[in-house]
């Protein structure tokens, strides 16, 4: 056979295979329904009784319809990022953008005004009766400021190193009452004298306080999931409602109805202050799903979800969601998981926000290792020798963690452009996505890199199908594709998908990654960060 004839034959076979792949059709169904927020934090109620809620990762401020249990965006990204919300005596609404370090205000439907900037971790805020505004940095700082409501003068530093003065409010005595997140106390502050005194002690992690019309001080304990009434004069405490952990904030309306936000539930509850009975106003089955891993036990697929405010599993057949752990719960080890891989008996959760990789026993749910000190880790896989490979976005490297507690760290390969997704390949090789370069590559144990596919738009999550093909979330094109690692052939499996939530502003290293996973029979699953949902893709 001549070279020309041979080339023609090979081309015909290749075109035939491509035609066969493209002819295959897939059915996309929603396995787990979505929800309104992308994590819910601060709450505020205006004079007309409207309930507002803030989201940091979603970078938006929402108005919640209490009657219908729905929410709509009141202030969109980027200015809408809000960790806490407060209303001035004249009705002006102010809110804090935690990650960008900005504080905004708006009166009615007027223009948005930036009152302060350069305050990373700007968290809680409250207006005084005379209209003066105060705010604190928490987690990324620890300071109390007075904020110029005109946005002209720089913030006036009042106190520092208090212990995490979180969601607070001025009391009838013109003192600022709030919780110290890191000290388990509720305190009051004389903002004029910069004097702090303890009101009540013995909380696990108090997150926020608020006053009702009778002068009672209400406190939410995020670690214990409790709503506690405190006598501000004596410090006497009474637990009124047992809710779930991961509480963030509360607001009380003019009828003394109490509304409490829960990050892990992506929801808000209304609590009766007399009986402690709680009614769900709005909630979600997932909080903010990122990376996922899938393991098949026989014919049963289980999806392991890094849900940012929780670690959850989903039944691949029924969509039933089970919870393994939630953020800030007492006795729970979890640090804002954003990526996940699963294989055999292991689940690995990664968080670029906290620089951690967590190794979990898949069957018992117990943590085997918590590795700290990574530079924006974006996915991880465990190798046969027990070492762990980590896509380290911050150092643009694939890092091997080995030795006792993974303390020995070496770069397998560097100069990666946005390493995000990671999947185990043959032997000790791995496949990884480079979101910024649009590449999918294979990296051998010795660091040798082979580009499998290029010119992709923002590839993130990656998984290996039973037939050895790669399944990739091409987020920039809002589609799931199949890639043949032998020749780089790319085939679209599903398009026009609700994936690719824009990264929250503030110079962050990345957004929440879109995860993909494949079951033993070839069923594909992916997370929707836009809808907070999980989808299932089945070949027809």
Image (cartoon, grey):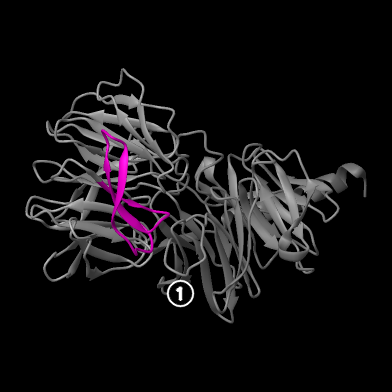
**With 191 as the anchor, is 5 left or right in this view?**
right
**With 19 as the anchor, is 48 left or right in this view?**
left
Across and down, in percent, residue 137 comes to 40, 39
Magenta-drawn stretch contains 186:
yes
Residue appearing at x 67%, y 47% in the figure? 392
Residue appearing at x 46%, y 48% in the figure? 499
Magenta-drawn stretch contains 104:
no
Rendered position, 536 above or below 113: below
**With 435 as the anchor, is 67 left or right in this view?**
left
Nearest to the observer: residue 134 or residue 58:
134
Residue appearing at x 77%, y 69% in the figure? 384
Task: Quadrant for residue 206, please give it.
Answer: bottom left
> Could you tell me if residue 19 is visible in this image?
no
Residue extending farthest to the top is 152
Nearest to the observer: residue 215 or residue 39:
215
Across and down, in percent, residue 178 comes to 29, 49
Residue appearing at x 6%, y 54% in the figure? 255
Mark 1, secondary structure of its residue: loop
Q: Give the range drawn in magenta.
A: 177-206
Nearest to the observer: residue 134 or residue 437:
134
Task: Quadrant for residue 462, please give it.
Answer: bottom right
Provide the residue designation for mark 1.
317
Residue extending farthest to the bottom is 298
């Amino acid at each position: 056979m001549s070279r020309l004839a041979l080339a023609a034959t090979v081309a015909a076979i290749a075109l035939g295979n491509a035609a066969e792949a493209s002819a295959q059709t897939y059915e996309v169904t929603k396995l787990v329904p979505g929800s309104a927020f992308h994590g819910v934090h601060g709450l505020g109620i205006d004079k007309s009784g409207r309930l507002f809620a803030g989201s940091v990762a979603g970078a938006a401020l929402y108005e919640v319809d209490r009657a219908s249990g729905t929410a709509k965006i009141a202030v969109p990204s980027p200015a809408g990022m809000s960790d806490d919300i407060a209303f001035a005596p004249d009705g002006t609404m102010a809110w804090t953008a935690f990650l960008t370090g900005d504080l905004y205000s708006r009166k009615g439907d007027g223009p948005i005004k930036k009152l302060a900037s350069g305050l990373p971790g700007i968290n809680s805020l409250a207006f005084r009766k005379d209209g003066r505004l105060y705010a604190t940095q928490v987690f990324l700082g620890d300071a109390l400021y007075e904020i110029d409501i005109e946005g002209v003068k720089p913030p006036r530093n009042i106190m520092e190193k208090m212990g995490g003065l979180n969601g607070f409010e001025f009391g009838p005595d013109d003192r600022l009452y709030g919780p110290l997140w890191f000290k388990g106390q509720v305190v009051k502050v004389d903002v004029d004298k910069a004097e702090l005194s303890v009101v009540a002690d013995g909380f696990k992690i108090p997150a926020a306080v608020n006053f009702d019309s009778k002068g009672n001080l209400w406190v939410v304990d995020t670690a214990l999931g409790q709503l506690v009434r405190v006598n501000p004069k004596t410090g006497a405490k009474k637990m009124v409602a047992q809710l779930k952990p991961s509480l963030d904030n509360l607001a009380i309306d003019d009828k003394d109805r109490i509304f409490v936000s829960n990050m892990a539930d992506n929801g808000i509850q209304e609590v009766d202050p007399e009986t402690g009975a709680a009614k769900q106003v709005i909630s979600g089955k997932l909080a903010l799903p990122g990376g996922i891993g899938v393991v098949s036990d026989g014919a049963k697929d289980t999806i392991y979800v890094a849900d940012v405010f929780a670690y959850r599993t989903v039944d691949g057949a029924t969509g039933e969601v089970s919870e393994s752990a939630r953020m800030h719960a007492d006795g729970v080890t979890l640090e804002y998981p954003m990526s996940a891989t699963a294989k055999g008996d292991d689940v690995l959760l990664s968080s670029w926000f906290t620089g951690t990789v967590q190794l979990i026993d898949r069957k018992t749910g117990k943590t085997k290792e918590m590795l700290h000190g990574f530079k924006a880790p974006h996915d991880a896989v465990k190798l046969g020798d027990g070492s762990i490979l980590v896509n380290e976005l911050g150092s643009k490297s694939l890092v091997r963690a080995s030795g006792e507690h993974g303390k020995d760290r070496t770069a397998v390969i560097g100069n990666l452009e946005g390493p995000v997704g990671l999947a185990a390949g043959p032997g000790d090789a791995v496949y990884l996505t480079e979101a910024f370069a649009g590449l999918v590559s294979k990296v051998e144990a010795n660091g040798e890199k082979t580009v499998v596919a290029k010119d992709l738009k923002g590839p993130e999550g990656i998984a290996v199908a039973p037939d050895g093909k790669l399944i990739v979330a091409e987020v920039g094109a809002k589609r799931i594709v199949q890639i043949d690692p032998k020749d780089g052939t790319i085939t679209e499996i599903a398009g026009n998908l609700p994936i690719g939530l824009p990264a929250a502003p503030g110079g962050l290293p990345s957004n929440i990654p879109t995860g993909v996973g494949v079951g033993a029979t070839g069923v594909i699953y992916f997370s929707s960060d836009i809808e907070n949902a999980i989808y299932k893709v089945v070949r027809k």
